[in-house]
Amino acid sequence: MLEDIQSFINSSGVAITGTNLFVSTIPESLTLAVGLFDYAGEPPDAIAQTRAPGLQVLIRATSYSAGRAMADAIYEVLSPVGDEIDDESLYSTGVEINGTQYNRILPLEIPWYSGKTDTAQHEFVCNYRVYFYKE
């Protein structure tokens, strides 16, 4: 799931894999970086063959404004996926990424400022529930 979400964000151009977009890590040396982490979600639904793990997007930046802008940009990429409230949303039926159908990437909150690290980098966080089919 993490690599698929990374690929989706990368294709949007908001962040670039290996440059400022990473899975399960964030290099301390970068001035602006996005890390994608999995965490507890909902149990798999064997009948519907769906999964709903948690996704945490963590942004670290030396500049508060750059970190906030990146957090908001990632939110704008992920939150429309499967959002059927939008009349003609590009992602109204979800999106297929690397052969997996993602029905919804549901934000559990808006991006929020979690403070500074020991190295004085600003951190922003947003948590999501990711619904997808798993055969």
Image (tube, grey):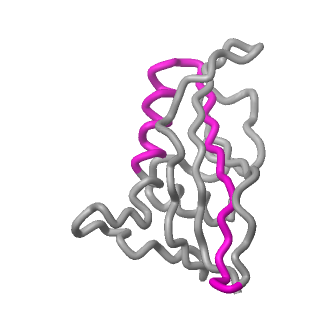
Q: Is residue 14 above or below residue 115?
A: below
Which residue corresponds to the image point at 71% horizontal and 56% vertical from the top-left?
A: 41
Q: Is residue 132 above or below residue 5?
A: below
Which residue corresponds to the image point at 50% horizontal and 65% vertical from the top-left?
A: 104
Quadrant for the N terminus in the image = bottom right
- Foreground pick, 106 / 11: 106
- Foreground pick, 99 / 52: 52
**Looking at the picture, how far across and down is residue 33, in whole percent?**
62, 36
Q: Is residue 125 above or below residue 25?
A: above
Quadrant for the C terminus in the image = bottom right
Residue at the outermost left position: 87
Q: Which residues are magenta?
A: 47-76
Q: Is residue 26 above or below residue 100?
A: above
Q: Could you say which quadrant of the image residue 43 lies in?
A: bottom right
Which residue corresponds to the image point at 70% horizontal and 61% vertical from the top-left?
A: 42
- Foreground pick, 88 / 8: 88
**Looking at the picture, how far across and down is residue 83, in whole percent?**
38, 62
**Looking at the picture, how far across and down is residue 47, in whole percent?**
68, 86
Q: How many marks?
A: 0
**Looking at the picture, how far across and down is residue 20, in whole percent?**
61, 42
Q: Can residue 108 be found in the magenta stretch?
A: no
Left or right of 109? Residue 23 is: right
Q: Could you say which quadrant of the image residue 118 lies in?
A: top right
Which residue corresponds to the image point at 73% horizontal and 38% vertical from the top-left?
A: 26
